[in-house]
Image: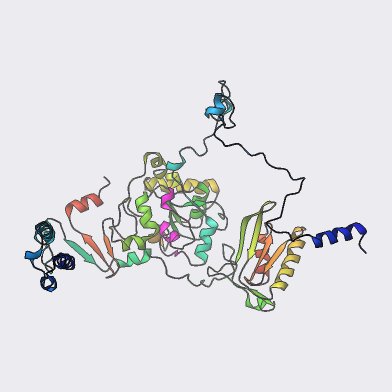
C-alpha cells in the first residue's frame, strides 16, 4: 500500500513541477484529502478494528473441563482379550495332521511325485491350488472358463497332458489357450473339478 | 496377357490425373439419403397433424385402452419385496468352515464367532449392504468333525445336528449393525478410539428366532436348550456326547452376555492400542447407559 501511495504522490508532484518534493519521502501533507480518507479507512479496517484484533500468540485459551467426568480405571491384564480379537498379520503355516486328506479333503503337495514332471504348479498363499473358474462372455454367449495360474517349467507339456486327461474323462473336444508370458492356461467349459483332480494326481 | 479392354482401361488411367480429395466423386449408382428440410418454412417437423404423436402424450406403458391390463390381471410374486430393509445373512458352508479349521485359519481352542470368521479374510461381509451376520449352510455336514463352540447369526436344523454330533455347541446370536461394524473389523474400531458398543435386542420379527431353543437362540431358556439337544439327537439318531464330563467343558459352555460383543471385554470400555491397556470409565451415567438394555 505504501508503494501505491508513493507512486500517486510522485505522479501528482511531477505534474505540478515540484520535483524536489516528488523525490522526497511522501508525507500526508502532499496527499489530497480524498486519498487521505481512503488510506485512513484502510488502516482502520486492518489495525484498529476491534473485531479483527487477535490475542497475542503463545497464550492458548484454557477450557474449563471441570464439568466433564474424567475418572477412569486402567487395566493392563485384560488386554489379552483384545489380542484374541485382532487379526493375524500373515497367513499361518499349515499344522501337521495325523493323516491325509484332512476332514475337509485337503492334502499337502507331494514333492516326490511332482519332481518327476517337467512343469510345476505352486500352491497359493492360502495353500490351495491356483485353479479358478469363472463365467465369461464369448461371441457365442456365456461359457465357463477355467484358468490355471502360477505355472513354472514346460507349460506346453502340461497343456497337452491336461487336454488328454479331460478328453478321456469327458469325451468332449477340449479347447485350451496357453499364455506363456502370464504363465497360465485357460480351458473352456466347466472342468475346474477335473483340472484340480489332475493336478492333485500329479502331486501339485 | 491382359485383354484389350483391360489394356485400354489401364492406358486411360495412366493418362488421367491422380485421384485426390479434390477430384474424387461418388459412383453414379450411389444412393443419397433424403435430407430433412430444417428451414423456417416447415411447420410440423415430421410429426404429422395434431394428436398424441405431435404432442408427446402417449399412453403409459402397459395401458390397454381402458380394459384391465395384463400387469394388473396376472398375480405377481414379490421376490424382491422390501429388499432394501430385509436382513441379509451371507452364507458360508460347514465344509468351508472345516477347511478353515484344518488350515489353522480359525482357532478352535477359543470360541468361534463372527470375529474369528471375518479375521480370516476369506469371508465377504458388508454392513452397508444390510448384512446382519453369517449364515452357516449345510454343505459338508457329513464331513464336519471339529469340536467347537460356535456362535453364528442364522442356521438350519441339520447344521445344528452336525455341530452337536461332533461334540460341540452352537448358539444363534443377533447383533445390531453398529456392533457388526465393530465385529467385522475390531482393529479399525479400536483405532478410532470409540468405546466398545453395547448390543441391542433383536427387532420384533427376529425375536422369535433368537429366543427359540430349537435354533439355540441366545435369549432362550438354557434348560429348554438341553432338552432340545437330546430331542435333536434322537431325531437324527446319534449319541450326544456328555457335556458335564468333557475336559473342555469351560470352553464349550462359554457364552457372551446379551449386551456384550467381545469375549472378556465389556461394553463401554475403551481400548488403548498404543499403551496396550484398557480404560474403564467410572461415571455413573455412563455405566447406566452401557449396562442397561434401554
Q: Position of residue A121 (x, y in %)?
A: 63, 72
Image location (x, y in percent) of residue B153: 43, 50
User: Which residue is outermost to the front?
Assistant: A17
Can residue B154 be seen? Answer: yes
- Image mark count: 0
The residue shown at (33%, 45%) is B201
Judge from the rendering whether residue B19 lies leftward or rightward of residue A5; answer left or right. right
Q: Which residues are magenta?
A: B105-131
Q: Is residue B222 left or right of residue A14?
A: right
Q: Nearer the viewer, residue A1 or B278?
A: A1
The residue most toward the left is A29
Magenta span contains residue B9: no
Q: Nearer the viewer, residue B293 or B122?
A: B122
Q: Residue at x 55, y 49 (%)?
A: B237
Image colouring: rainbow
Q: Is residue B58 visible?
A: no
Q: Quadrant of residue B115?
A: bottom left
Give percent across and percent down for residue B287.
Answer: 21, 53
Q: Residue A138 versus residue B134: which sits nearer the camera?
A: A138
Quadrant of the image containing the N terminus of chain B: bottom right
Q: Residue at x 68, y 53 (%)?
A: A139
A156 w.r.t. B138: above or below: below
In the displayed structure image, the side of residue B84 where residue B31 appears, left or right: right
Residue B106 part of the magenta segment? yes
B215 or A126, nearer to the observer: A126
Residue A169 rendering spot, x and y as whole percentages: 75, 61
Amino acid at each position: 500500500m505504501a508503494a501505491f501511495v508513493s507512486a500517486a504522490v510522485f505522479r501528482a508532484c511531477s505534474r505540478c513541477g515540484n520535483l524536489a518534493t516528488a523525490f522526497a519521502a511522501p508525507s500526508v501533507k502532499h496527499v489530497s484529502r480524498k486519498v487521505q480518507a481512503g488510506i485512513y479507512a484502510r488502516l482502520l479496517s486492518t489495525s484498529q478494528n476491534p473485531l479483527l484484533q487477535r490475542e497475542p500468540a503463545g497464550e492458548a485459551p484454557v477450557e474449563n473441563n471441570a464439568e466433564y467426568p474424567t475418572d477412569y480405571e486402567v487395566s493392563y491384564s485384560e488386554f489379552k482379550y483384545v489380542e484374541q480379537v485382532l487379526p493375524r498379520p500373515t497367513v499361518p503355516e499349515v499344522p501337521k495332521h495325523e493323516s491325509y486328506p484332512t476332514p475337509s479333503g485337503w492334502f499337502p503337495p507331494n514333492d516326490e511325485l511332482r519332481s518327476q514332471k517337467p512343469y510345476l504348479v505352486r500352491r497359493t498363499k492360502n495353500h490351495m491350488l491356483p485353479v479358478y473358474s469363472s463365467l465369461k462372455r464369448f461371441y457365442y454367449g456365456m461359457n465357463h472358463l477355467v484358468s490355471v495360474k502360477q505355472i513354472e517349467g514346460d507349460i506346453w507339456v502340461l497343456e497337452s497332458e491336461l487336454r488328454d486327461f479331460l478328453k478321456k474323462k469327458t469325451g468332449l473336444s477340449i479347447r485350451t489357450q496357453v499364455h506363456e508370458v502370464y504363465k497360465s492356461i485357460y480351458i473352456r467349459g466347466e472342468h475346474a473339478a477335473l483340472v484340480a483332480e489332475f493336478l492333485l494326481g500329479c502331486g501339485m | 496377357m491382359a485383354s484389350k479392354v483391360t489394356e485400354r482401361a489401364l492406358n486411360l488411367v495412366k493418362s488421367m490425373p491422380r485421384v485426390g480429395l479434390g477430384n474424387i466423386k461418388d459412383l453414379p449408382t450411389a444412393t443419397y439419403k433424403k435430407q430433412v428440410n430444417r428451414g423456417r418454412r416447415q411447420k410440423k417437423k415430421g410429426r404429422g397433424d395434431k394428436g398424441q404423436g405431435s404432442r408427446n402424450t402417449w399412453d403409459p406403458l402397459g395401458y390397454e385402452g381402458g380394459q384391465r391390463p395384463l400387469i394388473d390381471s396376472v398375480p405377481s410374486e414379490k421376490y424382491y419385496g422390501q429388499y432394501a430393509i430385509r436382513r441379509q445373512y451371507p452364507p458360508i458352508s460347514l465344509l468351508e468352515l472345516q477347511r478353515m479349521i484344518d488350515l489353522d485359519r480359525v482357532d478352535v481352542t477359543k470360541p468361534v464367532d463372527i470375529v474369528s470368521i471375518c479375521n480370516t479374510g476369506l469371508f465377504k461381509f458388508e454392513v452397508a449392504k444390510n448384512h446382519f451376520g453369517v449364515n452357516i449352510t449345510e454343505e459338508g455336514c457329513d464331513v464336519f468333525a471339529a469340536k467347537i463352540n460356535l456362535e453364528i447369526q442364522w442356521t438350519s436344523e441339520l447344521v445344528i445336528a452336525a455341530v452337536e454330533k461332533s461334540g460341540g455347541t452352537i448358539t444363534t446370536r443377533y447383533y445390531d449393525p453398529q456392533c457388526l461394524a465393530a465385529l467385522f473389523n475390531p482393529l479399525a474400531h479400536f483405532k478410532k478410539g470409540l468405546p466398545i458398543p453395547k448390543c441391542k435386542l433383536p427387532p420384533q420379527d427376529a425375536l422369535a428366532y433368537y429366543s427359540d431353543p430349537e435354533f439355540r437362540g441366545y435369549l432362550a431358556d438354557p434348560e429348554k436348550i438341553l432338552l432340545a439337544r437330546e430331542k435333536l439327537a434322537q431325531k437324527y439318531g446319534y449319541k450326544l456326547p456328555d457335556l458335564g464330563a468333557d475336559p473342555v467343558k469351560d470352553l464349550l459352555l462359554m457364552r457372551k452376555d446379551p449386551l456384550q460383543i467381545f469375549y472378556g471385554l465389556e461394553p463401554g470400555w475403551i481400548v488403548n492400542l498404543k499403551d496396550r491397556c484398557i480404560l474403564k470409565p467410572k461415571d455413573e451415567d455412563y455405566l447406566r447407559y452401557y449396562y442397561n438394555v434401554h
